[in-house]
Image (spheres, grey):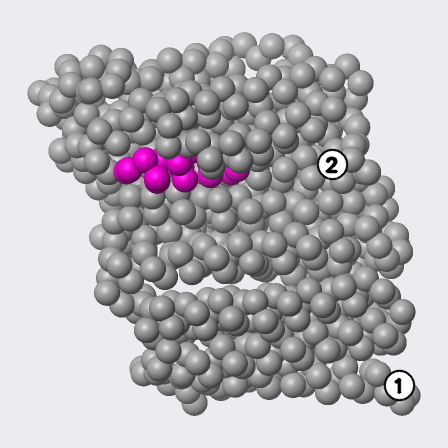
């Protein structure tokens, strides 16, 4: 029941807004539907905490501690982003960058995108997971090219082609997985259900499964933005509307990583040696290092934070690759805090670039003078994402580093150097944007800064004190991932 | 061990599929490319139907029907309409080094066969020897997307990659569960529509469907 509500709200929202998305009240309606999704997700979470894992709809969808935590996070960030996009998109309309027809497309696709992500998370059928993931790409492609500028079209084309090709590899991986599973579970729908696969994972054919994992990792890894498959990511983030950058970075990358981790659990069960973990650690470490060195060369503010997302996805992939309860705990925590912090940063960045009329970092100056809230939002968000102590990002990165030191000491120098380089690059660029003489203009629509500070407050809280039920929840999920 | 007649026909169709993938790789004319794509879809549908007949898996008939409707009729028709409206019907792609591309393609085919051999030995299906061909046609379509510089051939490369994947699904296993196949087909259809919308936007902005114009976003 709750599951149907979680999936039904955004789907209904997408359909209703496809008809009425050009009305004045559409942004409020969109935020309202997102709030409904959040409420349903909260009910679902309460239910799972009380009753434990469950399946529904003929076993096609399921909830366990791992995905319910991501469902709650996705619904929450989707709601705050809908709040942020109210003034943001109105200002864009005021600047004549979008017209009412495109706003209708925007609101409708935003809801459908949320639906596709939630379906990916909740789907028990590995094949449907693939379908929903591709649906999430399809629903955002036209949003990346919303402004119809040459650069945005190019970015959207790249996003579409690269992600479709990537995800085609994941389909091949899924076929191989089905091929292995069919021998054990028999042909038919059951052989692709994750819960059934998980039960018989020890009997699955190891050679087929290792090949399947390579294809799944390359396929879903393209969407995670792992180097060298990350080419689409900075362009899509820089050229699309900022609310879309926020949900791409904060949510879609997480969902793609979720698919990788789900595949890893199955493969680890079938294989003796730590084949999947090694691959993930390699890809993760490469992403962290390469992205860190690209950061200092960026001129566009959204591009820079997109590269920072590549870096953080690399840290999470590395953490899940190491495996074990502590590293998996750290990976889950990092998923949460990165998602919250990065979307908060994009909210602040969106308002800042509207106030200054540019995304070029050299022309954004003295935000605090014109609007202290935007300026402080950006400054605090940057400190948080760089892993400064009181914030939650520090906690998770510290856990990843200490685990790495104990189990894979060779990797720690790379991680430390990359984190240091990233700090120098981002801090050096954000500091003059925040302080000094201002270039910002007053905004026609009051900026939505509540979401920024709510996100940062949660990240701060997670750095100082993680509530016991949350710890318990992470532990359960981490034990499950192993 | 002699193969039954149905197995031999499927093998023949698989060879045809691979041949068509090579032909698409070398084809410069957009119009012929669409025809080749439709033929590939037809070969896929016939082989799926034969597997269905030989094994009695009724849901494969459905899958074959879906392939005919989507990949032989609907998508080629949409593409024909598109190239008419965009007036690129008689486009011929220059700047394509066919001999080198073909050699790379042969290399990929050999790689695909060596990768698929250990797996197809485990398969119990009548079509098991065709898994290598399926993987080879996926990789050839991939190569086609890399070497092409125009938008329409790139998209056809993407769609033919989907053909290869469906063939892999019927040859390794007897097709994916129906709900998954329906979902994939829906994604392909929506994707084709979005590609179509895109072509118009790209043309509007760049006055051409040549994606060499779209290489501005680079790292400096």
Residue A81 on image: x %, y % = 42, 25
Give the residue at x 27% y 67%.
B208
Residue A306 painted magenta: no
Q: Label for residue A267?
A: none
Q: Is residue B104 above or below residue B206?
A: below
Q: Chain of mark 2?
A: A
Query: SS of the residue at dot 2?
Result: strand
Q: Is residue A223 left or right of residue A54?
A: left
Label 2 belongs to which residue? A61
| Label 1: how many Cα within 10 Å (few below 14, some 14–19, many 20+) | few
Query: SS of the residue at dot 1?
Result: loop
Residue A86 on image: x %, y % = 36, 23
| Label 2: how many Cα within 10 Å (few below 14, some 14–19, many 20+) | many
Q: Nearer the viewer, residue B80 or A416?
A: B80
Give the residue at x 51% y 38%.
A113
Residue A115 placement: quadrant = top right
What segment is highlighted magenta in the picture?
A98-113
Give the residue at x 35% y 39%.
A101
Which quadrant would the C terminus of chain A be assigned to in this image?
top right
Q: Chain of mark 1?
A: B
Q: Is residue B45 in view from this perspective? A: yes
Label 1 belongs to which residue? B4
Q: Is residue B119 above or below residue A318?
A: below
Is there one chain holding both mark 1 and mark 2? no
Q: Is residue A296 left or right of residue B150?
A: left
């Amino acid at each position: 029941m709750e599951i149907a509500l979680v999936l039904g709200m955004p789907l209904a929202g997408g359909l209703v807004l496809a008809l009425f998305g050009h009305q004045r009240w559409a942004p409020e309606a969109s935020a309202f539907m997102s709030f409904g999704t959040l409420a349903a997700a909260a009910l679902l979470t309460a239910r799972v905490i009380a009753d434990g894992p469950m399946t529904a709809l003929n076993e096609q969808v399921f909830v366990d501690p791992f995905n319910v935590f991501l469902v709650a996070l996705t619904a929450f960030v989707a709601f705050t982003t809908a709040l942020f996009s109210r003034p943001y998109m109105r200002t864009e309309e005021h600047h004549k960058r979008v017209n009412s027809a495109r706003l209708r497309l925007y609101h409708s696709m935003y809801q459908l995108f949320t639906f596709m992500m939630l379906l990916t998370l909740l789907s028990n059928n590995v094949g449907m997971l693939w379908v929903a993931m591709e649906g999430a790409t399809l629903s955002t492609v036209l949003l990346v090219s919303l402004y119809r500028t040459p650069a945005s079209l190019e970015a959207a084309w790249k996003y579409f082609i690269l992600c479709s090709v990537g995800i085609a590899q994941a389909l091949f991986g899924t076929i191989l997985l089905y091929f292995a599973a069919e021998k054990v579970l028999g042909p038919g729908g059951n052989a692709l259900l994750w819960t059934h696969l998980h039960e018989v994972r020890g009997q699955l054919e190891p050679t087929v499964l290792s090949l399947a994992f390579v294809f799944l990792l390359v396929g879903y890894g393209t969407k995670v933005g792992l180097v060298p498959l990350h080419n689409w990511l900075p362009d899509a983030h820089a050229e699309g509307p900022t609310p879309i950058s926020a949900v791409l970075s904060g949510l879609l990358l997480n969902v793609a990583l979720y698919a990788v981790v789900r595949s890893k659990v199955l493969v680890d069960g079938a294989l003796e040696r730590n084949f999947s973990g090694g691959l993930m650690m390699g890809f993760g470490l490469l992403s962290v290092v390469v992205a860190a060195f690209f950061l200092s060369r960026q001129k566009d503010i959204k591009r820079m934070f997109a590269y920072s997302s590549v870096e953080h996805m690399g840290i999470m992939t590395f953490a899940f690759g190491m495996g074990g309860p502590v590293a998996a705990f750290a990976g889950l925590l990092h998923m949460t805090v990165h998602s919250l912090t990065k979307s908060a940063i994009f909210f602040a960045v969106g308002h800042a670039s509207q106030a200054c009329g540019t995304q070029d970092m050299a022309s954004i100056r003295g935000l605090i003078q014109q609007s202290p809230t935007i300026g402080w939002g950006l400054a605090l968000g940057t400190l948080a994402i760089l892993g400064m102590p009181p914030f939650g990002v520090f906690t998770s990165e510290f856990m990843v580093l200490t685990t790495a030191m104990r189990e894979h000491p060779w990797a720690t120098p790379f991680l430390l150097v990359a984190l240091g380089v990233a700090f120098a690059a981002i801090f050096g660029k954000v500091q003059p944007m925040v302080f000094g003489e201002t270039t910002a203009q007053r905004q026609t629509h009051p900026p939505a800064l509540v979401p920024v500070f709510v996100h940062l407050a949660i990240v701060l809280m997670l750095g100082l004190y993680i509530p016991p039920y949350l710890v318990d929840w992470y532990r359960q999920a981490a034990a499950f991932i192993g | 061990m002699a193969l039954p007649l149905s197995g031999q026909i499927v093998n023949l169709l698989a060879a045809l599929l691979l041949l068509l993938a090579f032909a698409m790789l070398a084809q410069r004319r957009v119009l012929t490319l669409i025809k080749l794509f439709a033929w590939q879809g037809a070969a896929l549908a016939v082989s799926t139907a034969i597997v269905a007949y030989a094994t009695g898996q009724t849901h494969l008939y459905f899958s074959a029907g879906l392939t005919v409707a989507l990949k032989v009729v609907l998508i080629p028709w949409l593409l024909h309409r598109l190239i008419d409206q965009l007036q690129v019907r008689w486009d011929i792609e220059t700047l394509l080094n066919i001999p080198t591309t073909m050699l790379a393609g042969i290399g990929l085919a050999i790689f695909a066969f060596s990768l698929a051999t250990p797996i197809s030995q485990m398969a119990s299906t009548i079509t098991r020897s065709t898994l290598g061909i399926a993987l080879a046609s996926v990789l050839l379509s991939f190569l086609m997307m890399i070497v092409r510089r125009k938008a329409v051939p790139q998209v056809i490369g993407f769609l033919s990659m989907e053909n290869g994947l469906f063939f892999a699904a019927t040859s390794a296993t007897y097709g994916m569960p129906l709900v998954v196949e329906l979902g994939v087909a829906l994604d392909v259809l929506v994707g084709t529509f979005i590609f179509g919308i895109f072509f118009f936007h790209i043309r509007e902005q760049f006055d051409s469907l040549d994606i060499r114009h779209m290489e501005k976003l680079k790292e400096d």
